[in-house]
């Protein structure tokens, strides 16, 4: 093996890997990050993928979770000094409905209350109650979501929660966290529009309206965005990654890009290095951190080094529905039928109703191209004009969800074949759906590109089958069961070898928590 001065080798250079590197360096360790892509970032990348001057966040875009992360709190000044900046609009998300209807959420409480009031005074009160409830539990819940599962810290946080809130409130919070979105929303709201406004957030994690545990994200994301605004990285999410990369490099961190790792080398039950695809070998003095999904992990390690039950659990790790992405450049903003200022909404969800999301989920899990999938429309250049030339715009459309290997079209209109053969017909269907709510879209598109589930996985093997969140977030594969029972603390059966990334707790999203916790666990062990 080629000797290298790295104490720790990190496989991957996404935001969790970069976070882990910073905490390991803070403890005095030397790190080498080896990344298969030509650029760091994982699923957080930006680029001029269609036209010069138009910057698109290619995959992830919402950095709200990162803004609440430990790494941001610890390295905030340095990251901003490295070129990272934040923009947040005053209209974080909205939903549109047929017949020119919509509900808009503002950071202004009164304007938001009036939106609910238009549909139901009871729903306006229910929204106010929900925000008050969030304010009561968030100071105790969010710290709980940033500690290892299970752990003394988790138990300590639960005890603190119990002392401050009492048995009844803690019991109610646990009940909320394990509810399905439908049950959670049916208890609180009476109109289909109010329910449709909040239910899409669970589907961002691949959880349909009737999936237990889906209420968590519908509750937390909607309230947090209302209170804080939708946070984006100014100039593109790559600027956040670049700031992290510079911080790592300034501490002596080294990067090897465009080089896939083929093997994690194990000797005497301990991880001692890696071999890359070009045949080179690198020694790690103290350990290896792999930001990979379980199915990839067992391909990197000789199966003889792993216990049988770990192998079985890794092979049985389940991925969720796939995603399809459409990026467009526009000659002007979208003109929404329901309200002029919808063009200022960071996200616009088009389902339109919770029943449509339920139908999409049922179709996709059975392998059908969905008839009317949820559209997550991000209008970043309305909030961050630096992303497009003056007067022009970019549009980010995440289509939730798609089967990774479709067997038929639910409408029997698209002939199922290769993704390349289907992508134009699929994107035409999506544009047609958008035009029902923003009719000018057909006349203002300059260029577009479609990333199918296969395209996403080809770009980043961690997006298995187009699953952007690293595996199902159902209760049996979340919290202390992520990635699977007995191995939720980032260790693996091999000494000195750790997992991080969105297949580990706390799961999908740009939260950076997994990278931080994996680094802390490694430092405790060495």
Image (spheres, rainbow, N blue to C red):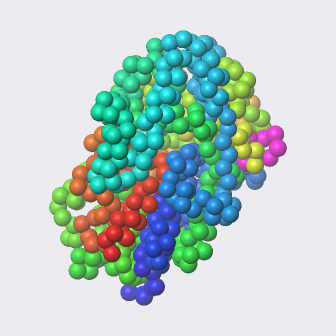
In this view of the protein, which residue sits in the foreground, 478 or 71? 71
Residue 314 falls within the magenta-colored stretch: no
Where residue 141 sits: x, y (%)? 41, 41
Where residue 50 sits: x, y (%)? 69, 50
**In this image, 458 relative to 144: left or right?**
right
Indicate whether 251 appears above or below 239: below
**In this image, 384 relative to 185: left or right?**
right
**In this image, 351 relative to 161: left or right?**
right
In this view of the protein, which residue sits in the foreground, 28 or 468? 28
Specify start and end residues of the magenta stretch as a single range.
387-394
Indicate whether 130 appears above or below 347: above
x 54%, y 11%: residue:
120
Q: Is residue 157 visible?
A: yes
x 45%, y 77%: residue:
29
Indicate whether 139 appears above or below 83: above
x 26%, y 80%: residue:
267
Residue 389 falls within the magenta-colored stretch: yes
Q: Residue furthest left?
A: 308
In this view of the protein, which residue sits in the foreground, 439 or 84? 84
């Amino acid at each position: 093996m080629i000797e290298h001065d790295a104490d720790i080798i990190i496989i991957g250079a996404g935001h969790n890997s970069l976070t882990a590197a910073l905490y390991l360096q803070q403890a005095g360790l030397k790190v080498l990050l080896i990344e298969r892509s030509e650029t760091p970032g994982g699923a957080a990348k930006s680029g001029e993928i269609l036209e010069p001057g138009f910057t698109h966040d290619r995959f992830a875009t919402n950095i709200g979770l990162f803004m609440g992360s430990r790494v941001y709190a610890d390295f905030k000044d340095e990251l901003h000094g490295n070129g990272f900046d934040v923009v947040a609009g005053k209209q974080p998300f909205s939903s549109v409905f047929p017949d020119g209807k919509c509900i808009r959420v503002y950071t202004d409480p009164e304007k938001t209350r009036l939106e609910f009031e238009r549909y139901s005074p009871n729903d306006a009160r229910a929204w106010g109650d929900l925000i008050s409830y969030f304010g009561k539990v968030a100071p105790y819940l969010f710290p709980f979501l940033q500690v290892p599962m299970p752990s003394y810290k988790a138990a300590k946080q639960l005890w603190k929660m119990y002392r401050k809130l009492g048995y009844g409130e803690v019991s109610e919070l646990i009940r909320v966290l394990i509810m399905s979105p439908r049950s959670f929303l049916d208890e609180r709201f009476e109109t289909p529009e109010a329910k449709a406004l909040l239910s899409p957030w669970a589907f961002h994690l691949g959880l349909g309206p009737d999936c237990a545990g889906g209420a968590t994200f519908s509750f937390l994301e909607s309230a947090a965005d209302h209170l804080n605004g939708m946070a984006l990285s100014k100039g593109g999410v790559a600027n956040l990654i670049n700031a992290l990369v510079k911080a790592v490099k300034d501490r002596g961190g080294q990067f090897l890009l465009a080089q896939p790792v083929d093997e994690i080398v194990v000797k005497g039950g301990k991880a001692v290095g890696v071999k890359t695809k070009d045949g080179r070998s690198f020694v790690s003095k103290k350990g290896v951190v792999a930001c990979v999904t379980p199915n990839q992990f067992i391909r990197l390690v000789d199966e003889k080094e792993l216990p049988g039950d770990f192998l079985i659990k890794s092979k049985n790790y389940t991925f969720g529905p796939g995603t399809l992405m459409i990026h467009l450049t526009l000659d002007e903003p979208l003109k929404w039928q329901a309200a002029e200022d919808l063009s200022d909404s960071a996200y616009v969800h088009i389902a339109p109703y919770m029943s449509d999301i339920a139908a999409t989920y049922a179709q996709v899990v059975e392998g059908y191209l969905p008839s009317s999938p949820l559209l997550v429309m991000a209008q970043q250049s309305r909030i961050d004009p630096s992303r497009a030339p003056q007067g022009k715009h970019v549009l980010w459309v995440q289509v939730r969800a798609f089967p990774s290997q479709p067997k038929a079209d639910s409408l029997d209109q698209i002939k199922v074949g290769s993704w390349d053969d289907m992508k134009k017909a699929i994107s035409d269907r999506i544009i047609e759906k958008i035009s029902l709510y923003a009719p000018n879209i057909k006349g203002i598109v300059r260029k577009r590109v479609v990333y199918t589930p296969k395209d996403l996985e080809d770009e980043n093997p961690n997006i298995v089958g187009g699953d952007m969140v690293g595996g199902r977030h159902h209760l049996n594969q979340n919290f202390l069961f992520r990635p699977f029972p007995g191995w939720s603390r980032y260790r693996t059966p091999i000494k000195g070898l750790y997992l991080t990334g969105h297949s580990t707790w706390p799961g999908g999203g740009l939260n950076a928590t997994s990278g931080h916790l994996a680094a802390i666990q490694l430092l405790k062990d060495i």
